[in-house]
Amino acid sequence: MQYEYAFEKMTIWQIARRVTKFVYVKTKSFPKEELFGMTGQMRRASVSVCCNLAEGSARISSTDQNRFYEIAFGSAVEVVNLLIVSKYLEYISEPDYQQLRSELEKLTYQINHLSGKRPSKIEEAKGIKGR
């Protein structure tokens, strides 16, 4: 059996992964001239959320963890902004907009509450409860 990293077990990372897939699928239909603009930026930002959640989960100190979670939150908000602009430019349908917006709202809520609630790996080792 393959080893499963801690971040793979995080519900929040699984939501971010779903968002990333949705972004990749839906941006395929964006205008070709947006490939290096809106399409690329939206894809990079969604991948950034996953990467920063994963990297933050591997950090030992809560300060380090929180910094990566803050970056993940910022990237998620960037995806929200790009989604809004995509809808305004009529690149994405209303149902797709609503579906992705709903997932992003769950994601940003959970990221926002992730930092400061979990003990760091050092604190866990010492038996200290979450803050």
Image (cartoon, rainbow, N blue to C red):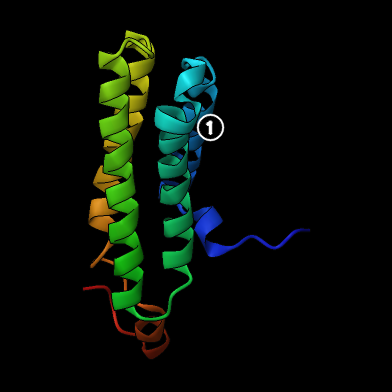
| Amino acid at pointer 1 | Lys
> Residue at position x 29%, y 68% from top?
66
Q: Quadrant of residue 89?
A: top left
Residue on which disc 1 sits: 21
Looking at the picture, how far across and down is residue 45, in whole percent? 40, 43
Q: Quadrant of residue 42?
A: top left
Q: Nearer the viewer, residue 6 or 98?
A: 98
Judged from this view, the residue extending furthest toward the right is: 1
Q: Nearer the viewer, residue 105 or 127?
A: 105
Looking at the picture, how far across and down is residue 27, in whole percent? 48, 23
Q: Quadrant of the N terminus?
A: bottom right
Q: Is residue 16 above or below residue 37?
A: below
> Residue at position x 70%, y 63% from top?
3
Q: Is residue 75 above or below residue 102?
A: below
Q: How many marks?
A: 1
Q: Residues within 10 Å of mark 1 (few under 14, many from 20)?
A: some
Looking at the picture, how far across and down is residue 104, in whole percent? 32, 35
Looking at the picture, how far across and down is residue 116, in whole percent? 23, 68
Judged from this view, the residue extending furthest toward the front is: 33
> Residue at position x 33%, y 36% from top?
79
Q: Quadrant of the C terminus?
A: bottom left
- Left or right: residue 76 versus residue 54 is left
- Left or right: residue 118 versus residue 121 is left
Q: Is residue 48 above or below residue 20?
A: below
Q: Secondary structure at mark 1?
A: helix
- Left or right: residue 120 versus residue 32 is left
> Residue at position x 39%, y 15% from top?
96
Judged from this view, the residue extending furthest toward the bottom is: 126
Q: Quadrant of residue 115?
A: bottom left
